[in-house]
Image (cartoon, rainbow, N blue to C red):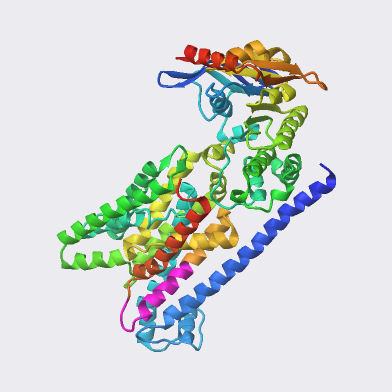
Amino acid sequence: MTRADQVTGESAGARGRSRRARRGVIVVVSACILLVSGVVLSAALGQLPISVANVAGSLLRAVGIDNPWAPTDELIERTLWQIRFPRVVMSLLVGATLAIAGAVMQAVFGNPLAEPGVVGVSSGAALGAASAITFGLAFLGGWTIAAFAFVGGLIATLLVYATARAQGRTETVTLLLTGVAINAFAGAGLALITFLGDNQSREQIVFWQLGSINGARWDEVAVVGVVGACATAVIMAFARQYDLLALGDRTASHLGIKVERLRIASIVLVALLTGAGVAFVGIISFVGLVVPHLIRMLLGPAHRMLFIASLVGGAALLVWADLLARTLVEASDLPIGMLTSLVGGPFFYWLIRRNRRQSGGWA
Amino acid sequence: MSDDTTGSALRVSHAGYGYGSRAILSDVSIDVRAREVLALVGPNGAGKSTLLSLLAGDVDPVEGTVLLQGRPLLEWSAKERARRRAVLLQSNQMVFPFTGQQVIEMGRAPWIGTPEADADEEAIARAIGFTDSGHLVHRTFPTLSGGEKARVSLARVLAQEAPVILLDEPTAALDLRHQEDVLRVARALAAAGAAVVVVLHDLSLAGAYADVVAVLDRGRIAATGDPAEVLTPELIGAVYGLEVRVIPDEDTGRPIVVPRRGSAGARGSSLAGREATQQ
């Protein structure tokens, strides 16, 4: 090989990297713009319309900057800080955690169709949380429901993992069929618990199966925020290892990755992220499928960028979905889980069709 | 590190391996030395891939030892092992659309955080040049053909720059020219000081490029040594159950192994004979 070849080889790598980095910045910035506009509109729109200036003013005042736009009306201030903002922040957090949970699951299973909702992790978590509500368990205070959701989600993830992984690869059909079985079982469990519960818990559980961010409180937001931030920090540190995992288990281990340890840690992280979200807003499917998939098409599969962009993209998607959920039909709050499934279902169908065309069916 | 391991990069001593009562390898001893290409040959099911797994550290032998630079292979940490031995497997599949460049860069992962990471760019460029895969770096891995995947994967293994390199049938998906190229690369690596183990099906390739040939037969080493001494019609006939002719290459004098196709009857009977002994 000549020196000239080496020079072009080096610059090819550098060129590819800088092009990818530039696209990454564009995508993340666009997603941020979507996110900010979604946040502002969500805070402004509703039964009590509030001007964008009032929203911005109230936020600025909260961080200690006095300004002329801040609302003087106590009702507006209370609406913003007790109803709208917690709801907006909750939708951001849940969107981000679900998107990242989906991306991690796809990395661990080496399969782009793995998603917490589809394979039953979300319904497992919902079953756990519903048990805590119906049986009035509260020994961990405000964390009880979240803890039960985590345990339910963890059991579901372990079941899927134990069933669908064989000889270092994931069989797509087994993965999806396991999801069907777990969703069916958790659905029946939820029905049973709904049947056993009193009227109040019944209502709460029905809401969950549909998914809704209505009535989010700051203490709940804090739980999701803390869990989400910790889990995401660990996941970001694993990003490079997930890249190597794409080479297959054996090759990843030949490159120095402790594959089994990485997988077990990832499964716990997915259950944490999904459980935290599901505990308070119910089952919101397909966010973890749609967002990472779109990001991968735009930016390629490298996981560091995938996680960052999915975080922002998932947050933006859910804040807009929630805005639609509560403004689409006047004076009523549509379940957001229903909305995401209305979009995600056909998308999933398209993915399956495309996959079938490309690989000639399921092996 | 004791004196007797000097020059030996990877040494297998009296190793045995199996599932339950079925022995896949028994009493296998081989010595993989720096500056040498060792070809591992043998019929299907003789235990070549299992032996390669032992050498790679995927599994621990049930009996015997595997020493990497004088220390038990699995006592090294995963990362230390990755800096000392690189492995190319037979099948290199990938679901996600990483580019060829990204896949080759993954070979540098064991060196992150070490001074050697400064040499990443050169190592990657060298690996691309060695494997003639410069035109594949911008394509996504899942869209490559079998042979192209094999070349990019080989580049990834070379980028790892480990002193011990294990190649499991690297020529299986390649055309005639690229088969020769891969083994020339193996020779060049050995000349540069690496210890190279290559599992091969083509005995003529083994004869042409290996310094040492080890023949596996039903989990045991049937013979090991210089290709010209090991690759005899008698040994190959006994191990493969096939009559062959061994012809010295006109240019190099190295052995070329060709099946005797003249008498179908002879081949049929010897195959039947082998099956009878296996029952």
Report x, y in % for residue A342.
Answer: 38, 69
| Front position in the image: A137 or B219 | B219
**Residue A327 in the image: above or below residue B121:** below
Is A295 placed left or right of A288 in the picture?
Answer: right
- Quadrant placement of the C terminus of chain B: top left
Question: Could you tell me which residue is drawn at 43 percent across and 45 percent down?
Answer: A171
Mostly what secondary structure, the magenta segment? helix
Q: Is residue A210 visible?
A: yes
- Quadrant placement of the N terminus of chain B: top right
Indicate yes or no whether the magenta region holds residue B78. no
| Front position in the image: B101 or B179 | B179
Report x, y in % for residue A114.
Answer: 43, 53
| Front position in the image: A61 or A268 | A268
**Count of number-bearing discs:** 0
Question: Could you tell me which residue is drawn at 25 percent across and 59 percent down?
Answer: A130
Report x, y in % for residue A217.
Answer: 34, 70
Q: Is residue A135 visible?
A: no
**Residue A359 in the image: above or below residue A334:** above
Is A268 placed left or right of B189 in the picture?
Answer: left
Is A174 placed left or right of A236 in the picture?
Answer: left
Indicate yes or no whether the magenta region holds residue A331. yes
Magenta residues span A315-333
**Residue A311 in the image: above or below residue B199:** below
Report x, y in % for residue A252.
Answer: 56, 40
| Front position in the image: A213 or A169 | A169
Is A128 placed left or right of B42 in the picture?
Answer: left
